[in-house]
């Protein structure tokens, strides 16, 4: 079997503020993976973080994809370059799982298809809000039960300014900060604003995103894990951002801005990023293959 073209899987942001576990978007920053048949598993890794051994998320996704087809996974030599910051709320684990399942789809001659890749990866991840945009690209609304993903319109002329602090917020710790029950008024607050996201994207009324991104369910309850995050969200909005929210479980803070308006938002987020970094990225595509 010939080596495959290079696979690109985007970073993603989940939640978008009000759409907890339901909304996500792909970013123009890609995990790159090459694979070819081998006598035994091998894994070469470059980029963010430290990934050891062959029992990593890419390989786990590959095994799961092959198992879904009733096939035995062959040994692979995998080379990965990962520019996505780890444990920063930018979907690095989802990108790796989607990459593995997409490899299974390619090695099987496309028997899973894009929808099958989504289903297998979402079941592995446990929730679809990062997986869905990694598969389909752009903005996506997703459900876990029943498993469903619907792409949303992609606005033109916008970019994300991301403030990435130097520390990690592990997802289990962020999940543990959430209560099992919330006040009805908070639930209603988020329901109304999460409905504004698709309405604003379909109508082109992007000014409504300023309200659509507001949240009472998860960001205030996780704020102690990300010092200054709530204040930084407000600073980004005052600086002209269309929307501002915590990416996934954090600590990355994402601000959606009109192209050409990045500078004041970058300046507003300098304090929050601290010794971390600022990234300015466009909206990404779903996973794709390119000839090397």
Image (spheres, rainbow, N blue to C red):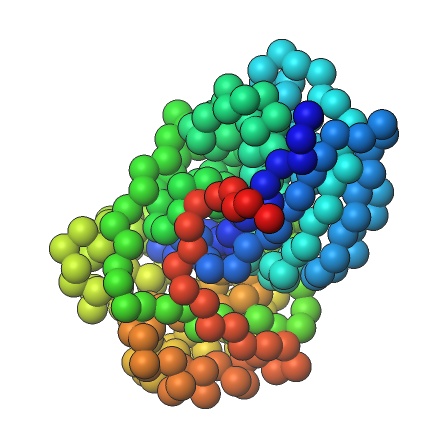
Estimate the x, y position of residue 176 in percent, counting from the top left.
61, 49
Q: Is residue 68 depicted above or below 63 in this figure?
A: above
Decide: is 170 above or below 144: below
Instruction: Tell me what residue is drawn at x 37 percent, y 51 percent.
Output: 138
Q: Is residue 71 left or right of residue 228?
A: right
Q: Is residue 65 above or below residue 87?
A: above
Number of numbered tags placed on the structure image: 0
Q: Nearer the viewer, residue 69 or 145?
A: 69
Name of the residue lying farthest toward the top: 70
Front residue of 239/94: it is 94
In the image, residue 277 above or below residue 152: below
Query: Can residue 292 be seen?
Result: yes
Residue 105: % across, % down: 55, 27
Residue at 78% in and 56% down: 50
The answer to which quarter of the image holds residue 97 is top right
Residue sitting at 61 percent across and 73 percent down?
165
Q: Position of residue 245 (x, y in %)?
A: 42, 65
Is residue 180 visible in this depiction of the protein?
no
Q: Give the image location of residue 270, x and y in percent.
A: 52, 85
Q: Quadrant of the N terminus?
A: top right
Locate residue 243 relative to residue 75 in the image: left or right: left
Relative to the observer, which residue lies in front, 188 or 206?
206
Tell me which residue sits at (31%, 68%) in the image: 158
């Amino acid at each position: 079997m010939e080596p495959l073209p290079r696979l690109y899987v985007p970073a993603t942001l989940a939640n978008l503020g009000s759409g907890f576990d339901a909304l996500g978007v792909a970013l123009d920053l890609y995990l790159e993976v090459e694979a070819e048949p081998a006598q035994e598993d091998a894994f070469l890794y470059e980029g963010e973080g430290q990934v050891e051994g062959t029992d990593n998320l890419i390989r786990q996704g590959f095994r799961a994809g092959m198992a879904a087809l009733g096939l035995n996974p062959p040994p692979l030599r995998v080379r990965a370059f990962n520019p996505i910051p780890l444990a920063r709320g930018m979907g690095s684990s989802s990108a790796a799982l989607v990459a593995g399942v997409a490899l299974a789809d390619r090695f099987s001659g496309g028997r899973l298809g894009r929808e099958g890749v989504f289903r297998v990866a979402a079941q592995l991840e446990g929730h679809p809000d990062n997986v869905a945009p990694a598969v389909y690209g752009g903005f996506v609304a997703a459900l876990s039960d029943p498993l469903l993903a619907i792409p949303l319109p992609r606005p033109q002329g916008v970019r994300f300014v991301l403030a990435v602090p130097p520390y990690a917020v592990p997802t289990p710790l962020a999940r543990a900060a959430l209560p099992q029950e919330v006040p009805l008024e908070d639930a209603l607050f988020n329901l109304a604003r999460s409905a504004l996201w698709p309405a604003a994207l379909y109508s082109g009324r992007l000014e409504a995103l300023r309200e659509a991104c507001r949240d009472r369910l998860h960001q205030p309850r996780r704020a102690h894990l990300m010092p200054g995050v709530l204040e930084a969200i407000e600073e980004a909005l005052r600086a002209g951002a269309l929307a501002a929210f915590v990416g996934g479980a954090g600590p990355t803070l994402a601000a959606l801005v009109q192209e050409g308006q990045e500078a004041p938002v970058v300046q507003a987020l300098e304090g929050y990023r601290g010794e971390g970094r600022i990234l300015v990225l466009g909206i990404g595509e779903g996973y794709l293959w390119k000839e090397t």
